[in-house]
Image: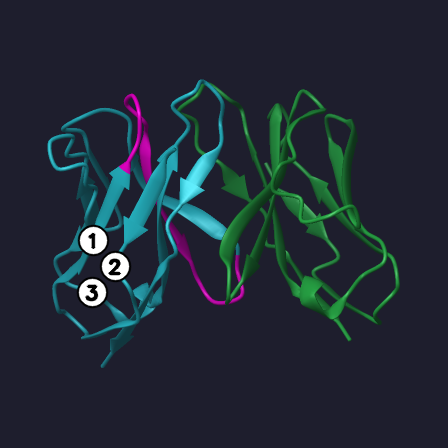
Amino acid sequence: GNSVTQMEGPVTLSEEAFLTINCTYTATGYPSLFWYVQYPGEGLQLLLKATKADDKGSNKGFEATYRKETTSFHLEKGSVQVSDSAVYFCALGDTGGGNKLTFGTGTQLKVEL
Amino acid sequence: DAGVIQSPRHEVTEMGQEVTLRCKPISGHDYLFWYRQTMMRGLELLIYFNNNVPIDDSGMPEDRFSAKMPNASFSTLKIQPSEPRDSAVYFCASTDGGGRATQYFGPGTRLLVL
């Protein structure tokens, strides 16, 4: 079945540092890939997505590229801010024609001054 | 649009009581999902509906949990009787389908069963 593996957290960075959160997936077919972010006390919000191989999703300075050859969708940001502190979830879309998402376990990011 | 609306935002109850969580999806969305989030188990899909019909309830933990969607703008998740291990944050999400569509999450209901 489909699955998502995300790097363990927490990740602690200083402000303006470079961020990478690794995400790899296992799936049949060609799923859409998503990154969601959850700020403390809130629900999940879509951060970015990519729907086919080599697509790059981007939003708020975050980027991720759909790499079919390595089955990866790593999240990157060149310079993090304290306000980026949150939990980040990688997710895999349903390849069976439905709309289920398979989520990774989440990676907590803490950005310090 | 107001987004996905959930109520109550917080619920504290005693073991054995019935708990009802409510969700109003985004207007026009034909898929609705219920998730549970805990530290131990992460984010789990409990059940989802398409056009008000339950499609997959394999994630519902046991018979104490039930979910309904009587119309396109309202769904409930009921726990009867509740147990302390049901303490979690319950999220509702909706999407307009299409196979690659984004799910939009509500703010969640934080449930504490004493």
- Tell me the number on the disc at residue A7: 2
Q: Which residue was labeled with disc 1? A: A22
Classify mark 2: helix, strand or loop: loop
Q: Position of residue A82 (x, y in %)?
A: 28, 72
In the image, taking residue A58 as reference, residue B22 lies left or right, namely right
Nearest to N terminus: mark 3 or mark 2 = 2
User: What span is in magenta?
Assistant: A26-42
- Tell me the number on the disc at residue A80: 3
Q: Are the numbered discs 3 and 2 placed on the same chain, yes or no? A: yes
In the image, taking residue A52 as reference, residue B8 lies left or right, namely right
Classify mark 3: helix, strand or loop: loop
Q: Amino acid at mark 2?
A: Met
Which chain: cyan?
A
In the rendered view of the protein, which quadrant contains the C terminus of chain A? bottom left
Q: Which of the 4 image quarters holds residue A56?
A: top left
Q: Residues within 10 Å of mark 3 (few under 14, many from 20)?
A: many
| Callout 3: chain | A
Q: Position of residue B91 (x, y in %)?
A: 60, 50
Which residue appears at 12% of the width and 37% of the height? A70
Classify mark 1: helix, strand or loop: loop
Q: Nearer the viewer, mark 1 or mark 3?
A: 1
Alpha carbon of mark 1 to alpha carbon of mark 3: how far?
16 Å
Colour in which the image shows chain B: green
Alpha carbon of mark 3 to alpha carbon of mark 2: how far?
18 Å
Q: Position of residue B39 (x, y in %)?
A: 50, 67
| Callout 2: chain | A
Circles 2 and 1: CB atoms closer than 8 Å: yes
Q: Does residue A29 belong to the magenta stretch?
A: yes
In the image, taking residue A58 as reference, residue B90 lies left or right, namely right
Nearest to N terminus: mark 2 or mark 1 = 2
Q: Amino acid at mark 1?
A: Asn
Which residue appears at 47% of the width and 67% of the height? A40
